[in-house]
Every structure is written in C-alpha cells, then in structure tokens.
Image (cartoon, rainbow, N blue to C red):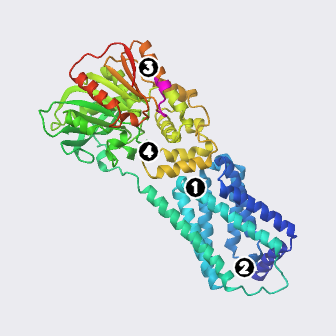
Amino acid sequence: MAKTREARRSAIGDWYARRPRWVHGTIGVLTVALGAVILVRPTTSLGVLALLIGAGLVVNGILELVTRDGAARAWWRWALSALWILAGLFVLAWPGLTVRVLVLVVGIGLMVGGAGRIVEAFRVRQSLDARIAAGVLGAAEVVFGVLAVLWPDITGLVVAVVFGARLVIVGLLELWHAIRPPRLDAEPAAPSGLSRWTRTIAAVAALVVAVGAGAVSVSLRGGSPVVDEFYAAPRTVPSEPGALIRSEPFTRGVPEDAEAWRILYTTTNGDGTPAVASGLVVVPKSGDGAWPVIEWSHGTTGFAQQCAPSLLAEPFESGALFLLPQIVDRGWALVATDYIGLGTAGPHPYLVGEPSARASLDAVRAARELESADLGPQTVAWGHSQGGGAALWVGAVGADYAPDVPLSGVAALAPASQLPAFVGSLDEITGGSVFASYVIAGYSGVYPDVTYRQYVRPGAEVTVRELATRCLAEPAMGASLLTLLGMTADPDIFAADPTTGPMGERMRENVPPATGDAPLLLGQGLADPLIVPSAQDAYVDGLCADGRQVDYRLYAGRGHVELVQPDSPLIPELLQWTEDRFADVPAEAGCTRREE
C-alpha cells in the first residue's frame, strides 16, 4: 500500500513536470500577477481583496498539490493543500460573508502551514540547510498567522502583503520551470554552497520581518490606557442622579496651587434609566472657598471605555482644556465629567445630547457632596467640540433636569451643533474616518434602529469597529487609519448617506434646541476644517429665529483646537465673559455677531 501511494504521488509530480512549457509559464505569470496586485496595493476594497485572496488560496493549494517534490510529501501536506483549496473556494463563493473573517482565514492557514513546515523540518529526511529553511520559514508563517488572528486591523495589511509575496515567489518558480524544466531522466546536480543556503537566508529574513511586525504591534497595543477598579459600579447604587458614589485624590496634570479628586457618581441615560459616570474635580488650595464652578464638557477623546480623560496621560489637555491654571488663579473650581461610557461601562453616547448634558449636570451635583471641595452655588458651563454640543444641551435642559444647578451662563466653543452637516462632511476631512467610527459606534449603541450593516461599507466594518475601540491619541490609531485607507479606494466609511434614514433622523433629534435662558457665548474659528463656519452660522441663525439670546464670536485664522489654545484671542474674552456671569453682570440681549 505504501509503495502504491508513493507511486501515485510520484506519478502526479511527473505528470505536472511533463506539462508543456507554456502551461508552466501561463500558471507562473497568472500567479505572479495575482500576488503582485495583493502585494503592491491590497486592492480598492476589502470585497475585491477577498476575491483576490480567495483565488490565491486556490492557486496556492493546487501548486502545493502538484509540485515535482510531491513524492516526498507526507499525508498531512496533501491535507493542507486540500484545505487551502477549500478555504479559497469558500471565500470565492461567499465573499460578503467572509469579508469580516478574511484575515482570520489567511491567519489560520499561515499558522497551520507554518506548523507543518516546522514538523517537516524534524521528520522528513533532508539536508541541514533544507531543515533550517523549513523550520525558520514555518516559524515566520506562524508568527504572521498569530498576529493576524489577534490584531487583524493592525496586521491585516501585513498579512495580505506576506500572502501576496508568497504567491509571487511561487509564480516565479513556475516561470523558472518553464524556462528550465526539470529533467526526469537524470540525477539532479549537487547544489553549490550559495544556492544551498539561499533559501535559508530568505527564510531568516522572513522571520525577522515577522518578529518586527509583532514587536510593532505589541508596542502599538501597549499605548492604550487601562481602566482600574475605581470605575466599577458597586452592587448597590443610589437611585437618585447626581449622587456621589466614591472619590479619591487625584494629582496628574493638576497645578501645584490646586487640589483635585476623581469621582464616581450616578446619572441618567437618555431613556431615563440610571447610569454611572466618572469625572474630575479641581479647586484652589488657598482662599475663602465656596468656589464658583466651571462645568467642563470635554472635546472628543475617543469612544471606548479607556478613553476617559481622567485615565489619560493628559487628563485636561486631551479634551482641549488648556486653561486649568487660569481657572485656579481666578479662584474658580473645575468639575469635568468623563461622560457615560468613558471610564465607566458603556455604551458612550457620542454626540447624543440628553445623556451628555445629564452627565455634566450630575457631575456638579455629585461634586458638591465633596466637603473638602467646598463648591459654591454658581455654575458656568464650558465645552469644546463634542463638549461644546454637550454644553449647548446643558443650557437647553438644565432648568428642567437639574433646577438645583442654576446656570449663570453657557460657553460653547466650536460646538458640534449641526450634526447632520458635521457627519455628512467627514469624508472630506483628513482623519474624518476616526470621528465617523465614533459616531456610528455611539448611535448604533444607543439607538437600535441604527446599524453598521445599514450604514458602513462591508469591507470597512472590521477596521471601523476596531477604530472605535481606540482613543484619539492612542498610538495604534495611526495603524488602523493606514489599514482603512489601504483597503478602501474612498476613505469614506459609509455605504449609505448617514444623514438619511434612521441615523439622519436621530442626528436631527440631537441638534441642540433653542430652549434655556442662560446667557450663551458661542465661539467659532473661521479656519476650522472640522466644524465649518457656514454650518455654525446656520445653527446660530436658527437659534436667533427662535428668539434665543446668542453672543456669537468668530476668530480669523483659528482652527478647531487653535481656537481654545492659550494664545487665542478668544481666551481673554472667555475669561472676562465668565467673570461677568459670576458677577451677575447682565449679558447683552438678543443676537450679536462679532468677527475678530
């Protein structure tokens, strides 16, 4: 039986070797071309990449099956060839179903194939150089496979490139067979020393690349903040919103003349269900106490739980608050919410107005329970970008939701106000895919009628979901963006217009209304590429038409973050405006517009 099997394998190999040269050449050219497309550019969409890799899996399996050295192959090598072919046929038959697990399929194939090479290095009789080459190349394939399975969004392109390179190499060997076909009636000549070790050198190079990719992936993943036990809700939580659950001293990023705490407190979701949020409280160390409160709603730091400002290396500046020293110097306190779902369990209601405003107002309520903080009764709400929209909502719902937190004023700085216009323009903005990933994650998490399947390109969904798990300043964010740009011809992640259908309706519901009577300062940079002035103008016009008081100030040459940096002309005006609010100086009535 064994001799019969060996004879069969030898016959298959001999049959393949005796094929006409043009057959070898055609197969070689097609294989090289297929690998080159995957290698040079992992295609215009992940759906097309699935088809290319599916075809590549089939070709790889066929070539493994019928190569000249088939007579020396163990049964498991034949089984592996069959698995390569079946995996490729599966991908080709159902590209829509397998696009999410494409890298997983290739990764498992690489791991199994690599393990087989390592086994072959020890069990098959061959020269020392062949053993080393097989073992090292097998180890490289295993490493790439593991990286693909663990971190598909970071190493997906790397795996695709490796697989493409593998096809190119196999195709070049086929072309070599077309040029110099093996002689079946002669003994092979003894290889020279250089040719004997060329394969080993190439295998070592592949392993070095694999280990390097692994090291880069680990370092990227290592930059993510870690959520500690402080943010875990206790089994028993007070039923009323704004109740302090726990607090502890906090020092990171706090000026020397101030003291701070991080707090965990109760709040309310948009549907009225109870929730838990975290935040920071900062007060001056010296003075008379009863500090007026700046309620700070931070700009975008991310969507995932670990992206809470209180967890980040720069807990204040990461959310665009650059004025903490000035706040402390003026004898004001700062109460800064992390929002629901950042630090605490989510989902985070990104750009969803009601729960964001409630978390901000409840943070002030909870901070008042800190006897050491000694907060006074006056509150002015500040917010930037995402937090600017939240601040507008604070002004709109504060009187009804938290009448015990009367507002002396609301300052919304480059606020995300006209949400449909903002989200609809993200495909035109550098890095807009990051914010788009947060929006779809937030809205699909809060609203059951908004789904990834309806709005996100199938080929981009894996990377978009991973993108939403990263903080804005996290090192791995750049790798995910490169992957997304590499796998889509159009950086727009949306398959359908997000301003239409359920998502469009939900965004319109979350445009801050014109309710509320606290004095409103709205600052906008005229060079802002993210929150464009024309959209802000339209929002302010709507407020004015509804009779809302607005002090609208625009600043030439100021971009999105530049608007709130210490050297911005907005800053002294914001501080003076806030001082006037605490001093009960009447705000200018009606709608005013100033350009500076």
The percent position of residue 137, horizontal first and vertical second, equals: 60, 72
| Helix, strand or loop for disc 3 | helix
> In which quarter of the view is residue 113 placed?
bottom right
What amino acid type is highlighted by mark number 2? Ala
* Image marks 1 and 2: residues in contact by CB distance under 8 Å: no
The percent position of residue 105, horizontal first and vertical second, equals: 62, 57
Quick one: label 2 or label 3, which is nearer the N terminus?
Answer: 2
Quick one: label 3 or label 1, which is nearer the N terminus?
Answer: 1
Q: CA distance from mark 4 to mark 3?
A: 28 Å
Foreground mark, 4 or 3, reads 3
Q: Which mark is residue 156?
A: 1
The reply to whether residue 391 is visible in this rendering is: yes
Q: Residue at point 69% right, 48% down?
A: 48
* Image marks 2 and 4: residues in contact by CB distance under 8 Å: no
What amino acid type is highlighted by mark number 1? Gly
> What segment carries the magenta color?
528-536
Give left or right: position of 152 versus 314: right
Q: Which mark is residue 540?
A: 3
Q: CA distance from mark 2 to mark 4?
A: 53 Å
Quarter of the picture holding the C terminus: top left
Quick one: label 4 or label 3, which is nearer the N terminus?
Answer: 4
Q: Which residue is mark 2?
A: 72
Q: CA distance from mark 1 to mark 2?
A: 33 Å
| Helix, strand or loop for disc 2 | helix
